[in-house]
Image: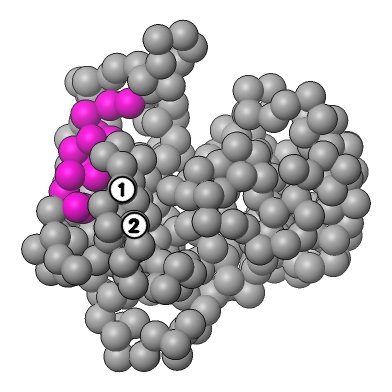
Amino acid sequence: MTALLPDARLAELDSFLLELNRAAGEAILPLFRGAHGLSNKFEVGFDPVTEADKGAERAIRKLIAERHPDHGVIGEEYGEDRADAEFVWVLDPVDGTRAFIAGLPLWTTLIGLRFQGKPVLGSIGQSFLGEVYIGHAGGSRRVTAAGETPLKVRPCPELTGAIIATTDPEACFNGAELGAWRQVRAAARLARLGCDAYAYAMVAAGTMDMVIEAGLKAWDIDAAIPVVAGAGGLTTDWRGEPVGPDGGQVVIAGDRACLDEALVALRRSAN
């Protein structure tokens, strides 16, 4: 069981989650590296959205409404619908829209499911590469056309041996947060930028060790929490506490010892 959710129901929803990923991919892939209908959400600055973002969320919401009309939805593009329901789907149809419009296959579709307010099931899908990283507390796996592979984080007891990531430190961190990132970065072995939520999947897959982000919304992180947990990893805020329902400052790590070392710096800039 996961958060009092019966195993049989969890298996049914797991299968449905893969169906949602297929529907999202059908909406997204024809527009990737093509005429994607780019527009800007902001009057000042740049927050891109494309027809792929909108179309994928519409496709996901349509299936949820048909199959589970009593479920709620929280989505980046179309807002909240019954957000206080027992089951609530949390959607980011194209996480990494900047990568998407640049033609880089680092964007993902994030679909999470809350049960009684807690993330219990999630997926990180990359339909161009034909991958879905899916998981819950009972285990996580990578699903491709060739089959399924269990996911497991790797040991990394010291930050000096870690491969870490963030999306864009100059744009996403305030001054204090940027200082904390730089301190962790100086201690780590290697850092990668601009991977968005695909980096979360790589922590679960055991190829990276930590992702540090700030200013996240619920749809940026909810889906990843069960995937990382099912692979043996951890997701916390910058104080080392569970991530709240609205996102915020977040750390994903594969090894508790490495996380604790990074939190020494991050706590100083925690909200």
Q: Position of residue 113 (x, y in %)?
A: 37, 65
Q: Which residue is mark 1?
A: 80
> What is the image's colouring?
one colour
Residue 24 on the magenta segment: no
Q: Where, quadrant-wise, is the C terminus in this rendering?
A: top right
Q: Which residue is mark 2?
A: 83
Q: Amino acid at mark 2?
A: Ala
Residue 57 on the magenta segment: yes
* Residue in the image at 78% along x and 55% along y: 239
The stretch of residues the image draws in magenta is 49-61
In the image shown, does 72 or 161 lie closer to the viewer?
A: 72
Q: Amino acid at mark 1?
A: Glu
- Residue density around tag 2, few if under 14, some if 14–19, many if 20 or more, within 10 Å: some
Compared with 254, 252 (above or below) is: above
* Residue in the image at 75% along x and 67% along y: 255
Q: Secondary structure at mark 2?
A: loop
Q: Disc 1 versus disc 2: distance between alpha carbons?
A: 6 Å
Compared with 169, 106 (above or below) is: below
The quarter of the picture where residue 207 lies is bottom right
Query: Do the residues bearing badges 1 and 2 touch, measured as CB atoms within 8 Å?
Result: yes
